[in-house]
Image (cartoon, helix red, strand yellow):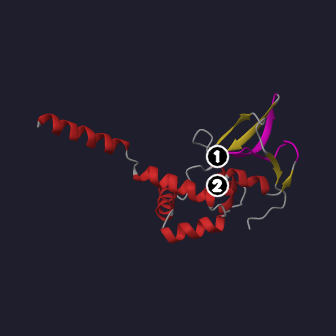
Amino acid sequence: MKKKLVAALVASACLIALSPTRADARSHRHFHHSVHHGTQAHRGAHHARHGIGRHRHRVRLSRAHRLGGRPAAWCGWWLGRHLGLPRRDLWLARNWARVGHNAGRPGIGVVVVWRHHVGIITGRTGGAWVVKSGNDGHTVRERPRSLSAAIAFRHLGGVSGS
């Protein structure tokens, strides 16, 4: 009798351990859905119907609220405020690559855009460009930086905060 009970408990434990969790099932369903129904409009309608993403949006807003209105990744937010362009779309660093016009190369006063960071060139020391940016080591810093991985150099002359 005792052996049967132990065998049943082991079998139950194995069944529980090997069964997919709700998170695994959700990830697979979301992946399957995005592969087979790839349009953004279709995904948006599906997410609205099924309530996907609503809670996550509320969490994001409350986190920004806790940080005084500042997003967690805040280099784009800081540069927008610093330059008088308080636009929400510029909170994402990469979006700065579409502001103003192409400077073609680095220079003082030029905005430098990396994939996940943005700053403004304020000078040159030796052979390095000095960049001022927010969220550089969790603070606003002005220091020499490598521009080798930059994806854009933007000149903002005459850009308004619209």
Quadrant where the image shows the N terminus: top left
Q: Earlier in the sequence, mark 1 or mark 2?
A: 2
Farthest right residue?
Answer: 104
Farthest top residue?
Answer: 126
Residue 106 image-quadrant placement: top right
For the residue pair 76 and 121, the one nearer the viewer reads as 76
Residue beneath label 2, please? 77
Compute the Cα span from label 1 to label 2: 8 Å
| Badge number at residue 134 | 1
Q: Residue at x 77, y 37 (%)?
A: 147
Is residue 35 visible to us here? yes
Q: Is residue 128 above or below residue 26?
A: above
Q: Secondary structure at mark 1?
A: loop
The part of the chain drawn in magenta is: 104-126
For the residue pair 86 and 73, the one nearer the viewer reads as 73
Q: Is residue 9 left or right of residue 126?
A: left
Q: Residue at x 66, y 54 (%)?
A: 92
